[in-house]
Amino acid sequence: MIAAKARFKFAKKLQNVAGFRVPDFAFNGVFMDILVSSLDYDSLDRTMRSQIIAFFKDFLECECKGSPQCGCPERKFALKILELRSLGLNHRQIGEVLLDDYGIEIYPTDILSFLEDSVHTLEAIRDVARIEGNEALLQKTIDAIREIEGK
């Protein structure tokens, strides 16, 4: 999944503030637990604080009992990438937005691969919907494919 490739750019700085080792990967369970439970937000510089708060609000807030280990953060991250793509951003621009807004570094090629995989999955769903005669699902998948492909 795409979230497994997302790294927090300022993990070393965060490690210095936290006083213990902080994983680089933004959706690592330990990293998310630190953001939820033991981080002193007041000791962070303004930029890092705003990025971590945005990360927390956009990806970690959910009502699941097992939060943040429930899978919601990873799904929300994937949806964020698809949302940015639907706004017309290319894979490089999506990477820049993720870095600016959340401090998340991810290779543009990984984003491009994720988008291509999403299209392939949607094509399979489209084909099944066509076979099953589910016109509503068929149209939704066609529309989603067009959004991702930028057509």
Image (cartoon, grey):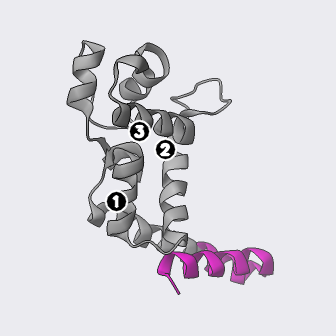
Q: Quadrant of residue 137?
A: bottom right
* Residue 54 position within the rendered picture, expressed as x and y whole percent measured from the top left: 49, 39
Furthest residue in direction front, as rendered: 46
Mark 2 burial class by Cα count in 10 Å: few <14, some 14-19, many 20+ = many
> Is 145 within the magenta?
yes
Could you say whether the residue bearing mark 3 is in a helix, strand or loop? helix
Report the Cα–Cα distance between label 3 and label 2.
17 Å
Q: For mark 2, what is the residue?
A: 74
Q: Is residue 36 visible?
A: yes
Q: Nearer the viewer, mark 3 or mark 2?
A: 3
Amino acid type of the residue tagged 3 in the rendering: Gln
Q: Compared to 10, does 142 lie above or below?
A: below
Q: Nearer the viewer, mark 1 or mark 3?
A: 3
Mark 3 burial class by Cα count in 10 Å: few <14, some 14-19, many 20+ = some
**Residue occupying the point 34% across, 43% down:** 103
Left of 57 or right of it: where is 3? Answer: left
Q: Which mark is residue 95?
A: 1
Q: For mark 3, what is the residue?
A: 51
Could you say whether the residue bearing mark 1 is in a helix, strand or loop? helix
Amino acid type of the residue tagged 2 in the rendering: Glu
* Residue 124 position within the rendered picture, expressed as x and y whole percent measured from the top left: 56, 75
**Sequence-wise first label, 1 or 2:** 2
Mark 1 burial class by Cα count in 10 Å: few <14, some 14-19, many 20+ = many
Q: Which residues are magenta?
A: 125-151
**Residue occupying the point 57% across, 27% down:** 67
